[in-house]
Structures are given as C-alpha cells and as structure tokens.
DNA sequence: GTGAGACCACCTCC
DNA sequence: CGGAGGTGGTCTCA
C-alpha cells in the first residue's frame, strides 16, 4: 500500500488569516505576489501524488479557522437530497445512499448519478466563495459542485470512477474536504478483484480538514477511488467536488 | 437489434 | 474492525 499520510495541521495556523502567495499553478500572478482578495488562504506546498496513470496534487487550501467557518456555513446553507433522489440502484436493488448528497451549479446544469439525471441548484454564497478560492489557486474554472456529507465513519462511498461523459475530460476534479479527516483509497482498474491481471499497489491518502485534492487527467480513466467505512470516526465530513460539465452533451 | 460488461449498493466471510 | 468476494436487475455501448 502506497501511503501518503498528512502531516498534522500546518504550524502556520496560528498566523491565520494571512495573505496567499503565488503557487506554481496560479495564473495571472507573479511569484511572491500577494492576492489581496484571499486573505484567509495560505501558501502551502503542493504534494504530488503519482503512480501509473494516476496524477493528483494535494495541498492544505484553508487554515483551520477558515475551514471551521466554511464547515459551519455549509451546515446552514446546503440542502441535501431526500426521498427518491437519495437512492441508488445497484445490482437491481434500490438502496438509500450511505451519506447525504446535493448538487449545485450554473443555471440549468444537470448531472447524472448512477443512471439518474438531476438538475443542479443555484450556487450558495459559501459554495461560490470556495469555488473562487479553488479557481484562484488552480487556474481552473468550474460550473458545478457535488456536495457529499458523511455524518460519521459509518457513512461512506463505494469504489467508482468519475468518468461521466458530460465531464470535461481535461479539467481536473477539485475535491475540498471539511470536517473529520477520512481515508481515500485509489485502486487501479487492472488490479481490482479476484481476476486482477496486474499487481499495482493501491494508493491511500488521508484527506484533512481544509485540504484540496486535484485529480488530474487521466487519473479517472484508470483509477477507482472510494471512501471506506471507518468505525472509529464519529464526527461529520463534508466533501465538495468541483467539476466542469460540458454544455453540449455528446451522443 | 442484441449480447457483454459494468455497476458510486449491500451482505457475508475471514 | 477492515478488506475481499459475491451478488443477479438494469442500463449502456460496441
């Protein structure tokens, strides 16, 4: 198991809020330049996570104080799907999804989850704010965010790829984590199950409060990821996955 | 039209 | 407790 465990929260936290300085992937800023509008973000080094066909970047995007604030605001703003919208059909059986889920994005956007297409709600102020921080940090724009709330370690997400056709294949998916730290497991498609014809180590990553994980192309072509049950965890986690959805659907 | 393979879930077993 | 394997209906795509 290839493991990329977080260091404890950065020791800059006591100085928060502070100015953010240029990061490698920033556009429109010169090295060392301070972004006056993002006074809560702080400069942390990107951690490159690579394997065969896997390409991710990980960083702490928000200091603890701001991550706490974002978590609290999202708890007040986000309205999660209920009833039939909160079920999924797998192997012919209907289940409630083992977490809460909501979709926000530009007007009229739809997304498809396990065969069901739904309309995105319009952005909330906090989701817009975080979206803009991610854009300022990565140079990528997003028109959609999927919100997943895991109430405790019992809530989880099974192994899957984010390979829907409506996603812009070259735009990374930006995953922001708030609340309880949880493990994310990547597994190569050719190394899964009993008939695995290749032996490729899974990649394990702990997603910290306030962190940002960028999943770059072609990660989602070759690697599945899951958020497994962790019975010792009793606190909630909110995950935001920002995406770019193509306006014209392919046929 | 049509067959293979995938499957964001659960359970049981070790 | 955690990870692997089986599931057996429906959909998608070649």
Image: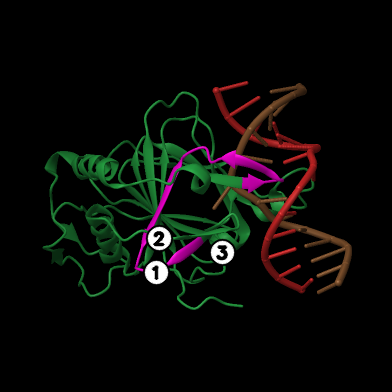
Chain colours: A green, B brown, C red
**Would residue A180 be visible to someone looking at this image?**
yes
Asked whether the residues under the numbered discs 2 and 1 touch, taking CB atoms below 8 Å apart as contact, a structural biologist would say yes
Q: Residue at x 39, y 69 (%)?
A: A108
**Separation of disc 2 and disc 1 at Cα?**
7 Å
Label 2 sits on a secondary structure element that is loop
Residue A7 appears left or right of A53: left
Asked whether the residues under the numbered discs 2 and 3 touch, taking CB atoms below 8 Å apart as contact, a structural biologist would say no
Residue A55 in picture, x, y percent from top left: 50, 60
Q: Quadrant of residue A214?
A: bottom left
User: Counting residues from the N terminus, which is met first, the one under dot 3 or under dot 1?
Assistant: 1
Residue A17 in picture, x, y percent from top left: 13, 48
Label 1 sits on a secondary structure element that is loop
**Would residue A202 be visible to someone looking at this image?**
no
Residue A164 in picture, x, y percent from top left: 56, 64
Q: Nearer the viewer, residue A15 or A184?
A: A184
Label 3 sits on a secondary structure element that is loop
**Relative to residue B14, is residue A190 depicted above or below?**
below
Q: Nearer the viewer, residue A130 or A94?
A: A94
* Foreground label between 2 and 3: 2
Mark 3 crowdedness (10 Å alpha carbons): few <14, some 14-19, many ≥20: some
Q: Residue at x 28, y 68 (%)?
A: A26
Q: Nearer the viewer, residue A137 or A244?
A: A244
Mark 1 crowdedness (10 Å alpha carbons): few <14, some 14-19, many ≥20: few
The residue singled out by tag 2 in the image is A120
Q: Quadrant of residue A181?
A: top left
Residue A148 in picture, x, y percent from top left: 42, 46
Q: Which mark is residue A108?
A: 1
The residue singled out by tag 3 in the image is A164
**Relative to residue C5, is residue A22 depicted above or below?**
below
Residue A194 appears left or right of A203: right
């Amino acid at each position: 198991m290839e493991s990329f465990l977080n260091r404890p929260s950065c020791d800059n936290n006591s100085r928060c809020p502070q100015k953010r300085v240029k990061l490698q992937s920033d556009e429109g800023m010169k090295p060392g330049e301070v972004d006056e509008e993002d006074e809560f973000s702080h400069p942390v080094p990107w951690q490159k996570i690579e394997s065969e066909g896997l390409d991710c970047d990980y960083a702490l995007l928000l200091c603890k104080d701001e991550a706490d604030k974002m978590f609290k605001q999202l708890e007040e703003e986000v309205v999660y799907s209920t009833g039939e919208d909160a079920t999924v059909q797998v192997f012919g059986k209907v289940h409630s999804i083992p977490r809460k889920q909501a979709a926000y994005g530009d007007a009229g956007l739809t997304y498809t989850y396990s065969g069901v297409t739904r309309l995105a709600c319009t952005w909330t102020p906090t989701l817009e704010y975080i979206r803009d921080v991610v854009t300022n940090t990565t140079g990528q724009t997003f028109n959609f965010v999927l919100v997943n709330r895991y109430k405790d370690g019992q809530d989880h997400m099974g192994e899957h790829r984010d390979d829907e056709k409506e996603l812009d294949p070259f735009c990374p998916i930006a995953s922001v984590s708030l609340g309880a730290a949880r493990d994310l497991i990547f597994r190569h498609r050719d190394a899964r199950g009993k008939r695995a014809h290749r032996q490729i180590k899974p990649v394990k990553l702990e997603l910290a409060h306030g962190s940002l994980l960028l999943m770059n192309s072609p990660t989602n072509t070759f690697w599945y990821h899951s958020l497994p049950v962790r019975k010792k965890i009793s606190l909630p986690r909110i995950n935001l996955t920002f995406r770019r959805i193509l306006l014209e659907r392919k046929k």
